[in-house]
Amino acid sequence: MSASASQALAYLEELPLTVHKKLYQQPSTVLAIFRCMLPHLAKTIVMAMLYMTGPLPIADLDAWVREDARSEKDKAVSNLESLHIINLEQESPKQYTYRLNAGFARSLRQALTGGGSHASFGVPPSQPDPERVDLAFLDEYARKRWETILYYMVASTSGLANAESLGSGVNDGTKTLLRNGEFVRVIHGKAHITEKGFSFVLQEVNSQVWSLLLIYLKHAEQLQMSEVDILSFIFMLGSLELGQDYSTETLSPTQQKMLEDLSALGIVYCSSKSSTRFYPTRLATTLTSEAGALSTVEPVIANALDAPSQGSSGKGYIIVETNYRLYAYTSSHLQIAVLNLFVKLTSRFPNLVAGKLTKESVRRANGLGISASQIIDYLATHAHPQMQKNNPVLPPTVMDQIRLWEYEGERIQTTDGYLMKDFRDEIEYNEIRAYTESLGILVWRNDHKRFLFLDRLEQVKLYMENKKNRGRSQASK
Amino acid sequence: MPPKRKAAQAVESDDDYDESLDEGVLSDQETFDRLKAQYDVVAMSKKARASHQVDAASHMFKKADQWDARLKPDHASRPLWVDDAGRIILESFSPAFSEAQTFLINIAEPQSRVSKIHEYSLTTHSLFAAVSVGFSTQDIISQLDKFSKTSLSPSVRSFIEKSTSSFGKARIVLKHTLSYIESDDPEILRRLLRDPTIAECRADGSNDLLQEAAPKVGGIAIPGTKAAAGANQVAQPQQQSEMMASLKEDDDDDDAAQVHSFQIKSEERERVIKRCQDIGLPLTEEYDFKNDEVNPDLEIDLRPSARIRDYQERALGKMFGNSRARSGIIVLPCGAGKTLVGITASCTIQKSIMVLCTSAMSAVQWRAEFIKWSNVDPNDIAVFTSSDKNTFPRQAGILISTYTMITATKKRSHDAEKVWDWIRSREWGLLVADEVHVVPANVFKKVTYAIASHCKLGLTATLLREDDKIETLNFLIGPKLYEANWQELAEQGHIAKVQCAEVWCQMTPEFYTEWLRPSSTNQKKALLSVMNPKKFQACQFLIDYHEKRGDKIIVFADNVFALEAYAKKLGKAYIYGDTPQAERLRILENFQHNELVNTIFLSKIGDTSLDLPEATCLIQISSHYGSRRQEAQRLGRILRAKRRNDEGFNAFFYSLVSKDTDEMFYSSKRQAFLVDQGYAFKVITRLEGLEHHNDLAFSTPQERRELLQSVVDAKEGAGDVENIKGDLFGSKYASNQGRGKKKAGVRRLAGTLSELSGGQDMAYIEYNKSKNKDLKKKQGVKNAFVKKLARNTENARKAAGK
């Protein structure tokens, strides 16, 4: 699962059952969640249960999974439970079973086999568009729009003299969005990028789109928009075809209103506000691509977005040497501005920028809230094809050094989370410890004092409630 | 002369130099400074920068911003970029890479040669060198333009033109021991003669210039090369690039095979050289040794078994490019056979040779190498050091000496004085200056003025100094003729592959508290960080680990206090400046041949010229501030590892630094040079298995406190860096000082004989003793069988005595 999908998943998991129920009425939504949100094992479980007539006893599920993959199974089941895709039910006093959410199952079957009149995969207009646009236009449109947003964000720190004007094309809706997401802070009418903003800028485009859309969702209620409608629309966009135009007539009022905002972001293209058709851009159609799509579809979009001048050189453009020198094959001001955040730039040629990673430049980036791993990720994902022949892609000494520079400045690390203590007995402590460990949410423990420190609580809560219910029913028997 | 006046003059006619007659008062430093100012690249690039368009991101690029330069349509197949300041960025994955590299190595200084992208920079000296090996201005520009992705900027063009037009146009040549100034262009000579100083120094009375045929290019064969191996002794050197060949053709077409010259007084030679530099026409020095019939020939040739490697051949090819010997510097990594280059050069010139090296120890090594590689009669090799003062008996020979001996300012002993006079009275064919980077300019100046040598060859691994004195060497010896690529040599197996690591050692709380104390002097702080128990443990652990692997280990410590403390505690042999010569040799021999002695501790006397091919692992516990040269030289000690061609062999280089001290800062500075040569330093924050190691030293707080106490009590100056007498690393250059020093260590104690003989049930056992003495004992007989034999004879003798 890609980083972008996981942040979307985290959001989805927090939604209540009622929202989930509504969402699962749309086959496109169900398909998108199934395709890109679920871990591999969860998919297998869902597929196995999809055409099952009855519920699946817990014991059976346990029998499917090998002992050494127990933690994987726990994770998958926990995901499915929190998304309310499967529910734990008590069949008989002794037997617990899992049952697939009826709405989810119905929609998924519909998406897989076709049929129905749901129109959730979009409806092309009956008349062909007289002003049909081609793929290149859409890519260019999306790139321009998205870059404008990034320019707007980095204007304050990029050091680009004309950054202000470059980012001036951003409309008010988007500005509010960025402010709501705490990516920028507006001081005296000027946008200043925040720590969150920096990590946003360094992300993959796909992750960036998701982050913005999630912010959009979180603030939807203020705009009197239905969360479900928005989500369904996002998932629908993910299953549309690039280059095809779609009719706006089947969309709900919320979704029609949303179209305007999305076109400001460059996710869809409408020739005018009154137009009854829209085109999804590459930013939209890659939204719910599967994890694997990152390496196939992503390069195309990265290329379209990142390296306009270097069509042929493929995805990456950065070379990092063991002597900490960095060479970037680019002429894009945006990329220069991003590099300038953590590289001491020295010279520039028409298609090359040269600089050096120094302790000062990396520490300065750390000071702005950019972490060493973000820098390393950025360098690795944008590595020049020549670098990608290496394994690992970046010279290990350079990666170590970047981390050490950061580490040198921060000798104390903080983690937000929850402390669990006062367990009833050793057995309970051990059980919870094993469960949280298998979910990978256990940060620290002290066996002697029976303390557990977790970075997330929901699953454990659910687990304990289930256990309590089970215990009660057993007691009542 | 202030630059201002110079500028004012430039407006006047070209040949009006009358005003600058006061050159006598100028020191050389000023001359250099002025020349530097004249060819200042930075100023030029600044000017060039103004001509470029500025865009929003321009201010981010401090050094160069040439985004508006025109990109050639087929830029993808061209390998390099050139910026206004002459810096060149080269793609190593480009198809034209090797061709471009061969060219760049001739015209530019390599800055960094790592894996994907290399950097070079054009300097006046590198262009000077290019001209002196036969490149024309036009050639340099057109080739560079051919390789460049963008069209060459006018400022680079004019920089190349300016540098090459003034450099190397005229040559100073010793012919039949007479000095001539020679040039292809008579106009240049006329211009020189218009200068009153030079005119004054002219020896031939006539007004005409002499004319003769130009020497044939590549007319000689360097012994040991492929060319010499073939039957055809005048074969053309094969390494000439295509472009060089085309250049030669051009020369033939122009019928420019005429050289013009005039003679100057030999005794005014130095003045002329200086004067020519002053007026912007520096002379190259060349020696036509083939036609030198005055100086007797030396019978010397390489042994048939000696083969020189292709990069050595390339280097020598530069030196003997047009059948004359050119003065200059050859830069090869340690262990890549600098000595052999020097010997081969000697065998090519076959005149009297003078070799200067840094210490008496390396003088001995040079002598051995000469005998090993060439067929020279050992009697013809004389050594002139504080312990040997020989001359060679015949007309020609080889003299090996140290810089200290030659430049001694104090009154010499009678013997030394005699040899010295003899040296000065002779003419030398070649002066080989080993480890030329350590020689301060003023010392070397003395050497060059005192010794009449036709040709000078400087050898070094690291043409760097933390002060910028390197540039002056360009004037005193000559341009850099060749610099090898370390990574390439390592790939080809000529030098060992090395894993470099920097080990971070936490300071223990008690040491750090002391370190932080405001009253701690810098020396004390340095000592505290060296003596850090954690570092000691790391060192101990690494020694144990590598000894178990079968490595031979050298541990370097600049600080003698620490050196002694470490070596004694760990029971290892150590050598530092005050170790007597005999003891040094004994320890080194043991290290090489005795399998029980796998580790030695060296102070910085071991940095250079110590040939220990057995060593495969190197640990550095303290070092000289941020000296890049020292780091590279030390690395050099393991580059010639014997086992380097074994499958998967790696040598190891560890640098131990105490965290949160100055050492961290200096260590990154020190590594700069090696990192640019493509070495990667891995940072190790934790040594795997250190905590499970048995009997670590200083594992209890008690021991650590005692150690701290000893460090605190150490007398002031213990933290000082060792000052080695008679060694060029020290600040004093006086010779013979070390000998007069009184040896400490004899004390008179009261006691009874029975005590000492063990009559009171007491025995003397020295803990913490120096391993050095141990080695001395072992010196006699090592083999058990031989020992037994000796014992038997002894017993037999005793029995017989009874």
Image (cartoon, coloured by chain):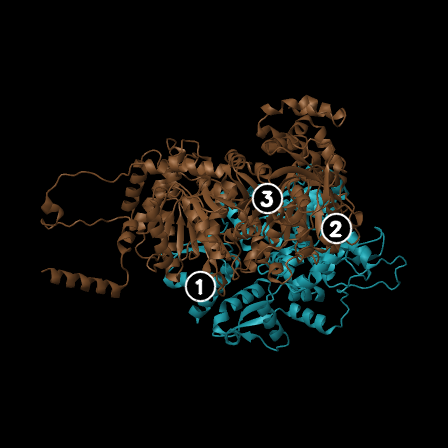
Which chain hosts label 3? Answer: B
Camera-side residue of B782 and B114:
B782
Residue A259 showing in the rendered view: no
**Residue A13: percent from the left, percent from the top?**
59, 59
**Chain displayed in cyan:** A
Disc 2 marks which residue?
B247
Q: Pointer 1 and pointer 2: residues touching (CB < 8 Å)?
A: no
Q: CA distance from mark 1 to mark 2?
A: 79 Å
- The mark found on residue B328 in the picture is 3
Circle 1: residue type: Ala
- Residue at 9%, 49% (x, y): give it: B759
Where's the N terminus of chain B, which quadrant?
top right
Q: In the image, is residue B199 above or below residue B140?
A: above
- Residue at 60%, 48% (x, y): give it: B482
Q: Kindly state the secondary structure of the residue where label 2 is placed.
A: helix
Disc 1 marks which residue?
A434
Camera-side residue of A181 and A230:
A181
Q: CA distance from mark 2 to mark 3?
A: 23 Å
Q: Is residue B60 left or right of residue B747?
A: right
Mark nearer the viewer, 3 or 1? 3
Q: Kindly state the secondary structure of the residue where label 1 is placed.
A: helix
Chain B: drawing colour: brown
Q: CA distance from mark 3 to mark 1?
A: 73 Å
Q: In the image, is residue B376 above or below residue B166?
A: below
Q: Do the residues indicated by labels 2 and 3 lie within the same chain of the protein?
A: yes
Camera-side residue of B701 and B71:
B71
**Residue B726: percent from the left, percent from the top?**
40, 38
Q: Quadrant of residue B268?
A: top right
Circle 2: residue type: Leu
